[in-house]
Each structure stands twice: as structure tokens, then as C-alpha cells.
Amino acid sequence: MDVTGLSLTTITLFLPIAGLVVLLFMNGEIHKNSLKWVAFATSIVTFVASVLMWINFDPSVAELQMAQRNTWAEVTLGESVINVSYFVGVDGISMLLVLLTTFIMPIAILGSFGSHIFEERGREKLYYIFLMLLEWSMIGVFVVHDLIIFYVFWEVTLVPMYFLIGIWGSEDRIYAAVKFFLYTMAGSILMLIAILYVGNRSGTFSTYSAGGDIGVIERVQTFDGAGTYWDAPGPDGEGEESGFLLNSVESFLFLGFLVAFAIKVPIFPFHSWLPDAHVQAPTAGSVILAGVLLKMGTYGIVRFNLNLFPEATVAWAPTIAFLGVVGIIYGAWVSYAQDNVKKLVAYSSVSHLGFVVVGIFALNAQGLQGATLQMVNHGISTGGLFLIVGMLYERWHTKEMAAYGGIWKVMPLFGAISLVISLSSMGLPGLNGFIGEFTILLGSLGSDYLGFAFTLFATLGVILAAVYLLKMFQHVFMGEVKNPLANEDGYTLTWYEKAAYIPIIIMVFWMGLQPIVFFNMLDVSVDKIVAMFVR
Amino acid sequence: MFEPPTIAEFLAQSNLASTLPATLLLTWTLILVLADLFAGEERQHWTPLLACLGLGLSFLSNVFVYSPAAGEQVALYGMFVADAFTGFLNAVILVATLVAVLMSWDYLNRAEIHRGEYYILALISSAGAMFMVGANDLIIVFVALELLSIPLYILAAFRSIKNDGSDLALKSEESGMKYFILGAFSSAFLVFGAALVYGATGSTSIPQIFAAAGSIVGAATSATFYLLVGAAMLIVGLGFKVAVVPFHMWTPDVYEGAPTPVTAFMSVTAKIGGFAALLRILISGLSVLALADGDAAAWQATATIIAILTLVLGNFVAISQRNLKRMLAYSSIAHAGYIMVAVAAAGSANVIDAATQGALVYMMAYMFTNLGAFAVVMAIEKADGSGGNIDDLNGLAQSRPLMAMAMTVFMLSLTGVPLTAGFVGKFMIFSAAVQAGLFGLAVVGVLTSVVSAFYYIRVVVNMYLRDSAGELIPALETRYVRWAINIALAGTLVFGVFYPLATNLVSMVSIA
């Protein structure tokens, strides 16, 4: 199979860069009003390109599709030369997450159309440049299958997000931005060492096989020697005797990758950067952070931890799933205690992503499919919730829940939209959130690796989600109007605000009522991973 | 009896053509002396212009002498070796000197101390560094080191030429004096080490030391002891020059006191010269110095400990610095630590080439990035030397967007964020360390670069996220500094984005 030609994946990946270049050549003052249109048009074109990919995507094929692999550089390691290659392609999981990215991006841009932050902070051009850079690097994370290039994209996402929070965020933005940068960098840099070891050990940085070169995943899966691939003596006699958990090379490699991803997700004890970053970020930043950036972590666990280190995955599954369950309950609990709307939604992310973690480490088809679908669901629902909070803030300039009340009375359409999105987030049957959570719970119940207790406590999270989201809804939208706006025009939604919600509502119902479309995309890709864990 | 060689024999043995880049630069300084003497007050700018021309010519000759086809050649009766290692580092040194000359041009005018001697000294020092990277004999190492250092002592004190009793002049004088005394002290270590190695092996030539060291180690006589002590003293002597912990004490004071372009220049060329000699001596000369057969070289443990100490101290102390030059001084100590990681990795026989290449790429990346950062610091520094604190960067993105962008790129590159040259360098040395099995060292290396992110990002925070207290920062610099920044920025980005470029440039390097 010739995979060196230009593929649709490459085109989709680099479209945001085209938009970025156009923006670079525009004048921030003279073209002030067209900046957002260029960014918006780019994100729409990228979305169309990703939909074309979807049309071309054949869900019955297990291999990477629309793949492209070109050797980029040669790294000398001792006597061997290892290729670093530009290797892109999608399977079902990647495809779904690319679609999520390109779907959220135009919505996030629409969400900043009427924002007041530019009156205060200016630098609109820089803002859209960073958004384009962010889109490029996020798509890159999801489609790249070379460990080094993956690391490059992974780290590059930090820079635009850091500036988005730091320049256009709220009062404590500098603290939040620096914390975000250092925290995530501290996690991911250990992954670099693990990546170097993997490349050094297996003689390639490509995870999948292509063009006659055998990828790391295939090497791991077809290994038939004694012990495991990583712990068996290598061709040069290196490697150590296996003993688990902390007594093997594989476990250390697993943890090297996992810590990077766990911080990004975030899994329970690593979550403390998230409320700060979310609360301080501008609306578009929060939407992207919750919608896509967190999924990079869960995606990384599925793609790398599960595929590369199956034995360590099995050994660590109950521990990590336990942290996931703790996250579900802890996140929900803390969320309930918040007076700040944005913080409430932020902590709800910790809770929702706990479900994803439990689903992944159930290590069966239902769990993994549910987890992947839940990544998308959470992106759509929580992205929507952050948009709601952003629009409230634009009008009332506060995030305190106590200041709101009775908004349904003055903004009935907005209230209805918010109700649908809140219900979707708490997992009402018929809407998208239910499908994901239900499948995950089903998976954890049938899992060979997790016990009944995991399902039991995770289910508590579904109830708690209803508690904190209904509390928010009640305080903000029900009751009497506490602080009427001076200017009644503020009660009408502008066209771009409505336009931002339409696709979200469509997806909430579509994924809720016809999930088979999305499950079909995942079937084969998930089965390929799960096949390693069938007992 | 000593017989004078025939002319033909002399020409063949000295093979001056291979040393052309360095000798050309050295002779060019004579032209500069004459030009500066006759140019007069009103044609002062001739000297820097001619200096740039000389650097360009030297660069051109470097390209011809070190074309891939040329292979390895020895010159000066075997005391100088012209290989890909020399050629690559020559190019790095020449670019560094060019950027430093561009910076100085502006600085000297601003400080009203414009003297032609400045450029002459800079070029001599740069020629010294070029001799040092090609040195194939401990005597040449020493001579080249002095040629590199003595002009630097003078340059560090250059601000005190205008003896106005100001704080700046005093600090510069102190800087030069301190550098001189400690430099002389470290040279003594180097010479003593060379003497011990000569005593043990009977030669000062690096290839002959290599040949002798193997049998000495096998025989396990007292010569082994002298060789070990000699090697340790060489490491100490060169360790002073490259400022690794615990031989770093002079660095912050000297860097802070010296004129900014001199600081930039010496933080790059002196380090490159020192590390080149260190790599050459340890790898080409002493890589067989293992205590047991099949072990890694005996100096690997020493280099590992030095690297860890340097990384930890450099990065942690840099956090508390408010003065930008001092912060960059400590950060340069930390970067010496990263190069030391590569030196340590080179102790394992199968990683030598990968480690050497990693060190070279790291030095190149560091050269562009560090010079760029210093150029930005210089550009915002006021004539009275104030304005060099980290808070003086507040709001730079508003008043000088392009300069702030350049500084951001430099800071990200020093941190080692992908798509900058700094990442390519870090990637290569860490992969060498992992390959050598030095996992602890690699982990310390990456974790300390997170620590370094803290103080580098603070610079970006101040430029972009804080507003300046008073009026906008005015443009003080001339176009020469902007050229310097642009060259550094281009290098940082081109080598960062086009990763294969750097690896291809060093793929021929092998000094084992």
C-alpha cells in the first residue's frame, strides 16, 4: 500500500494553518471586523473537510484510513537509525474525535463574536491566530501516529491555550495560565523519556505499521517470546525480569504515559489545575478546554497505554478505574458545593470524565465504545454549558449563582436551550449523555477486570449529576428575576448566539436518538483493541 | 639533532589550508588594526563593517574546507584536526560572533565607548575558539584556550574605559578582574592535568593518548592513577570555562557586570570552545579509560554527577533572579548542564556518536536562542544600564509586538517546547542519555526543564499579560540589534520547524 501520497487527513490538518497565515497578513486595526470572519470561515472549511473524511471513512476497516506516511528525519541511536515520520491517518476513534474538534471550533468562535473582552484587552488578531494554532495542534494530536510528532503536537497545544487564558481571561488569569502550563508540562515531559525508550527499544517511533515498516503496536501484539515484549530480554540482551506492579519496565513506561494523560483528563488527584483554568479562561477557551483538550488525555490512554502496554494495563486497570470512580463522586460532590456557576460546570467535568476513565479500564467493547462516545457527548454538553455561562456573564458580569434567578421569565428561549443541555449533561434517556453513561455502566458491569462495586459507585455519580445540575438550573433560571438588566434589549439572543446553539441541540438529539450511527464507526476499531484483553 | 624541515615538507605537514577559517580570521584582525588606525573618528563604523566582512570570508572558507567530500584532515603537524566536528562548530562560532558584533555596534555607541579594539579582540577570541574545536593536542588546547580567554578578560572590563566612576564602570572592571583571576586559576588546573596525562602516556597528542591509554588501563600500574587524576584535572579546568557546578561561582557576577554583548558572546563562544575540547579529550582521547573491561568510561560517573548538580542548581537559582542578565547567567549554567548530559552519555561506547551529535545540535540551538535573548535584553536596556530587570519587560507586547514575539520564541526554545531549535537539541541529548541507560539523569533533565519553564514563562507573562507601569517602552536600539535578533529568530525557528536540517548537518560527525 502506497501511503506517501497526499491524504485528506493532511489537508484537514493543515487547513487551520492556512487560516492562520491569512490572519498573519491582515492588519489588526484596519481589518478589525473581518478577523473573526476569516477565523470562522476557516473553521467551517475545516469542518467540511472533516465531514468529507467521514464520508470517505469505511467503518468496516480496522486499519488506519486516509493514511499518509513520509519519512521526516533520521535519529541516530547508537548503531541503529530510527525514522521519525510524518504519519497521519484515522481509525474510528480518531475520526470521531477529529469531528468533535472541527465541530466545537466554529461554535467556540461564534461564542466570542460579541464578546466584551476585546473592548477591554484588544489584540483580536492574536486571539484568532491562537485559536487557529490550537485547532491545528488538537487535530494533530488525534491523527498522528508517530510518537515523536505526537509529542510535538501534544506540547504545542499548551502554548495557544496558555495565552488564551493569560491574555483574555478573568481576574486571576496569570496564576491560572502559569499553573496550567507548568502542571501539564510537568506531566507530559516524563512521557518524552518513555517515548524515547519505546523508540530505542523497538526501533521505530511509528505506532502502526505502514509501508513495510512494522509499528510498535504490532510488535507488541505479535510478540511470542517469554514474558512480555517490554520486559523480555531485547535483541541486545537488555531488559529485566518481569514482576509486577512497580517491578517491571513496562509498568514504568505505562506510568510515564499515564501521568501525562491523567493530568490532561484530569483523573482525580491531578485535577487541581482544571477549576482555575476553566474559571479564568474566556468563554471560547473554556469551551475548547472542556470540549476537546481534556479528551486528548482520554484519547491518549486508549491509543497508547492500552495498545502499547497491554499487560501493564491489565495490572493497573482496577487502580486507575478506582481513581475514576473517586473522581466521579468527588467531582460531583465538590460541584454541588460551588456558588460560582463556572466552577460548578468545571468540577462537573472531573465527574464526567471519571466515567470515561471507568469505561476505558473496563477493557471490554461496551466500556470502550461508551467511553469514546462519552468523550464526544461531554464535549458537546459541557461545551454548551460553558457557552451558557459565558452568555450569562456577558450580560450580568458575574459568575455568582446567587446573583441570578428567574432568567426563564425574561429569556424563555435561552432557558429552554439551557434546560435541554443540562438534561443532556445529566444523562436523561433520549439525549446523548444517557447513551454514553449507560454503555459505560453496562461495560463496567460485564468487565472481567472490574468488580460490581465500581458500577455501583459510578451509578451514584449519575444521580449526583442530576442533583448539582438541577440545583444550578433552579437557582439561575427559576424563581423571581433578581437583577433585571437595565437595557431590555439584552434579553434577546443575537443571531450568532442562536447559531452557536443550533448545532449543539441537533447533536444532543441525534446522538441520543440514533446512536447506532456513531457506534458503527467505533465497532471495528474498538474490537481490535479489546481483542487483546479477552480472557 | 634538530633538522629544519624542507619547505615542501613543512607545507605538507602543516597543511595550512585546512586551518584556513581560523587562520584567516586571525590574520584579518591585523587588517582591522591597520584599518582602525587609519580610519579616523568620522569613519568609525569601518571597523565593525570590516569585522563582519572578515567573519563572512571565514564562513565562506569554512564551507569550502569542510565540504562533506573533504573528510578528515590533520594539520599543524597533527596538532589540529579538521573534520566535520570542527567544521560544524566553526560555523556556529562564526554566526555567534557575527550576531555579537552586530549587537556591540549599537551598544558601544549607546554607551559612548566606541573603540575599534573591541572588534579586534572579539575576532581574536573567536579565532581562539575555532582553534580549540579543532585542537588535537593538549598543547593546542591550552594555547587556544588562552587565545580565547585573554581577549574576553579585556572585553568583560571594556565598559570601564570610560572612567566616569559610575556603578556600571566599576561593575565591569570587577567583572573583568574576577574573570581573569578565576580563568588563570582554571588554566593552571588544565596545564597540571595535561602534565599528568603526559606523564602517564608519554604524549600530549590526543590520538596517541588514546593509543597509550588502552594498554595503561590494562596494565593497572601507577600510571593509571596519574591518568585518572590528570583526566579529572582536565575536567576541572575546562569545567571552569563552561561554568558547570561546582566550578560556576564566577558566572553570575561576571555576566552581570560585563557589557551585555560581551556577556552574550562569552556565554556562547567560551562554552562552545570548552565543551568542544572536553568532548575531544574525553571521547577521542580517553574513551578507553574504563576501570573494568566492557564498563562505561571512568569519567561517565563524574560527568553524570556534574550534570545533575548543574541542572538542579542552575535552574533552581535562576527562579529567584530579578535581573534579566543574572537570570540568563544562571540559565546558561543550566544549559551547560544539559550539554553535560550528552557528555555523560558519550561515556557509553555505543552512544558516542549520537551523544556528540546531540551536543553539537544543542550548542547550535543554544547559540541562536541565547544570543537572541541577550539581544532583546540589550535592546530594552537604557544607556545608564538600568531597565534590565524582569519587571522592565512589562507591557513589551503592547509597545514592541515584534520584539516581544521574538523573545517569546527564545524563551520557549530555552524551555524546549517543540517547533523551536531548543526542543531538537533537548530531544537529541535525552535520547542519547536514554540509549546510554542513564535514565535517572534523563529524568532529572526533563524535570529540571519544567522548573526552567517557570522562570522563562515569567518573562512571557510580563511581556504579554502585565501592563507597563508607566509610559510605553521606547525603541532605543538601532537596526543592527534588530538584525541580530532577526538572525537569532530565524535560526531558532528554521532549525526547530525543519527538524531534519539539524540532524543532517551533524550526521557526518564522529570523533570516536
Image: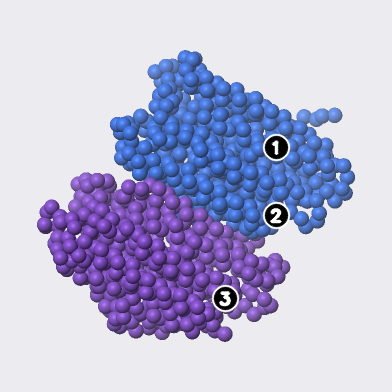
Q: How is the image coloured?
A: by chain
- What's the mark number on residue B348? 2
Badge 2 density bin: few <14, some 14–19, many ≥20, Cα 10 Å? many
Of the two numbered discs 1 and 3 in the rendering, the one whose residue sits closer to the viewer = 3
Palette colour of chain A: purple
Question: What percent of the width, then of the height, locates residue B29?
Answer: 54, 26
Question: From this viewpoint, which residue is outermost toward the left?
Answer: A488
Considering the numbered disc 1 on the image, is that residue within a helix, a strand or a loop? Answer: helix
The blue-tinted chain is B
Residue at image mark 3 = A314
Considering the numbered disc 3 on the image, is that residue within a helix, a strand or a loop? Answer: helix
Q: Are the numbered discs 1 and 2 placed on the same chain, yes or no? A: yes
**Spatial CA span between label 1 and label 2:** 21 Å
Chain of the residue under label 3: A
Residue A415 occupies which quadrant of the picture?
A: bottom left
Residue type highlighted by circle 2: Ser
Chain of the residue under label 1: B
